[in-house]
């Protein structure tokens, strides 16, 4: 009971953190493996879509290169997640966490898309720093502990270092953008 | 006494001979070797590798995402993109310390010590 209520609280906090505006009542009680698989695919899709925009719109070479890496890496992770779900016979299932991620992504894109030049670069990299941190927190506190299937759990554990490297890379660019102001 | 002197002389020659052979082994050229660096968990393992000129360094990518091993100084060299489960190689020709990185993930750093 204690574990269950702790997890519910954690889910509520995380979900609220991932997308501002989502009410606590909409927080899920738990995530099934098909739901975790859906979150994994959605989280990667979100980063790929914003990176595709940044590949064309960013003005800094470093930011463009970072965006290209995001498209490549998150496409590779997404393909791996889909291949594993197919192998396991798991059909990814939509859920409140995926929805909150999509809502947050739409809000971020609406803010970033109208910007140009250095303002665009800064807003995109700021978003990437925040987004990767949120996804790493979700992996550590929600997705990895919740997942029951050993193969799916291993995939999540295996991709974590890539997200950490992305976060460090984004922070490095964030620092150099501030310095070049 | 003569027998002992002869024995001492023999042992001395043996020790000197072995010492010379060991010294020759250290400084002389040895056949080129192949060394392996694993790319896993977004790191190079080992991060620093000691090799001799003419040795082959092979990088194997154990991660899901692609990597490169690319010189960050001179001379310029680059394995190009290495996909999951694939490998790339480089044969250093000159002595020195050569830092390198993954161009996709600049936080991944390694060093070749060519001695």
Image (cartoon, coloured by chain):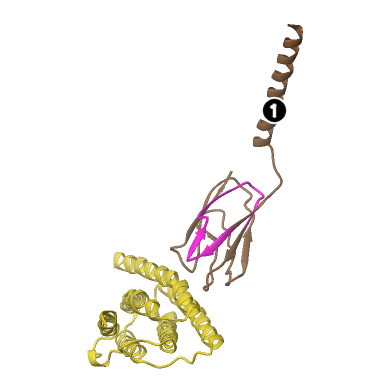
Chain colours: A yellow, B brown
Q: Residue B79 location, x and y as percent?
A: 59, 63
Quarter-wise, where is residue A102 in the image? bottom left
Residue range (magenta): B37-57
The overriding secondary structure of the stretch rendered in magenta is strand
Front in this rendered view, residue B38 or B5: B5
Picture layout, residue A106 above or below residue B96: below
Picture layout, residue B112 above or below residue A141: above
* Left or right: B91 in relation to A53: right
Quarter-wise, where is residue A122 in the image? bottom left
Front in this rendered view, residue B95 or A181: B95
Front in this rendered view, residue A172 or B31: B31
Picture layout, residue B59 above or below residue A71: above
User: In the rendered image, which quarter contains the C terminus of chain A?
Assistant: bottom left
- Would you name the residue on which mark 1 appears? B18
Residue in the image at 45% along x and 64% along y:
B106
Q: Residue B17 location, x and y as percent?
A: 71, 25
Quarter-wise, where is residue A112 in the image? bottom left
* Left or right: B102 in relation to B55: left
* Left or right: B7 in relation to B114: right
Front in this rendered view, residue A150 or A162: A150
* Left or right: A53 in relation to B98: left
Residue in the image at 54% along x and 88% along y:
A86
Q: Is residue B55 magenta?
A: yes
Few, some or many C-alpha atoms within 10 Å of disc 1 (few <14, some 14-19, many ≥20)?
Answer: few
Q: Residue A161 location, x and y as percent?
A: 43, 69
SS at mark 1 in the image: helix
């Amino acid at each position: 009971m204690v574990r269950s209520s702790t997890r519910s609280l954690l889910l509520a906090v995380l979900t609220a953190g991932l997308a501002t505006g989502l009410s606590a009542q909409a927080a899920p009680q738990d995530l099934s493996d098909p739901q975790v698989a859906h979150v994994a695919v959605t989280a990667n899709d979100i980063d790929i879509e914003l990176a595709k925009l940044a590949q064309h719109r960013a003005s800094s070479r470093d930011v463009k290169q970072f965006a290209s890496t995001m498209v490549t890496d998150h496409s590779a992770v997404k393909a791996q997640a889909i291949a594993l779900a197919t192998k396991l016979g798991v059909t990814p299932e939509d859920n409140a966490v995926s929805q909150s991620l999509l809502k947050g992504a739409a809000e971020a894109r609406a803010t970033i898309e109208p910007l140009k030049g250095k303002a665009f670069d800064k807003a995109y990299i700021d978003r990437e720093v925040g987004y990767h941190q949120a996804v790493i927190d979700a992996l550590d506190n929600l997705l990895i502990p919740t997942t029951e299937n050993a193969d799916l759990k291993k995939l999540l554990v295996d991709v974590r270092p890539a997200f950490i490297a992305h976060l460090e890379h984004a922070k490095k660019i964030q620092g150099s953008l501030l310095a070049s102001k | 006494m003569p027998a002992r002197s002869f024995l001492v002389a023999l042992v001395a020659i043996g020790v000197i001979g072995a010492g010379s052979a060991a010294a020759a082994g250290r400084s002389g050229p040895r056949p080129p070797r192949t060394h392996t660096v694993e790319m896993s968990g977004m790191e190079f393992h080992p991060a620093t590798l000691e090799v001799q000129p003419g040795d082959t360094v092979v990088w194997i990518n154990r991660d899901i995402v692609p990597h490169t091993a690319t010189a960050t100084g001179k001379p310029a060299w680059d394995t190009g993109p290495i996909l999951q489960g694939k490998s790339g190689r480089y044969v250093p020709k000159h002595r020195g310390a050569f830092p390198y990185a993954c161009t996709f993930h600049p936080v991944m750093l390694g060093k070749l010590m060519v001695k």
